[in-house]
Image: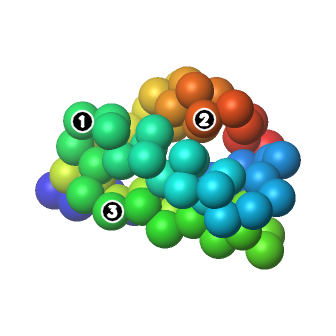
Amino acid sequence: MSTTSEYTVTGMTCGHCVASVREEIEALPGVTAVDVTLADGSVRVDADRELGRDEVETAVAEAGYALA
């Protein structure tokens, strides 16, 4: 079963920010793809299991940012 979740991350200002957020989310178990867009802060996460918002929020916080 594949799931897709969408979030908005606040505070990203550069490509390094995008890479940091992507890396932290990619490290979550079950994540198969992450697409982060700097312009609007959107994040799309594909996973082979249901991800909890709290899991993604914790990963984003590890990168130094927050979910909107």
Q: Residues within 10 Å of mark 2 (few under 14, many from 20)?
A: some
Disc 2 + disc 1, Cβ < 8 Å: no
Quadrant of the image containing the C terminus: top right
Q: Earlier in the sequence, mark 2 or mark 1?
A: 1
Q: Position of residue 10 (x, y in %)?
A: 81, 48
User: Residue 51 falls in which quadrant of the image?
Assistant: top left
Residue 25 location (% of width, % of height): 44, 43
Label 1: state its secondary structure: loop
Q: Which mark is residue 29?
A: 1
Instruction: Give the farthest residue toward the left.
Output: 1
Q: Nearer the viewer, residue 21 or 41?
A: 21
- Colour scheme: rainbow
Observer able to see residue 34: yes
Figure check: 48 above or below 4: above
Using the image as rendered, state which of residue 38 and residue 16 is in the foreground. Answer: 16
Q: Which residue is mark 3?
A: 33
The reply to whether callout 2 and callout 3 are in contact (CB within 8 Å) is no
- Residue at horizontal 69%, vertical 32%? 64
Q: Residue at x 57, y 65 (%)?
A: 36
Q: Secondary structure at mark 3?
A: strand
Residue 43 location, quadrant: bottom right
Q: Amino acid at mark 2?
A: Ala
Density class for disc 1 (Cα within 10 Å; few <14, some 14-19, many ≥20) is few
Can residue 42 be seen by looking at this rendering? no
Q: Distance of mark 2 from mark 1, alpha carbons?
A: 17 Å
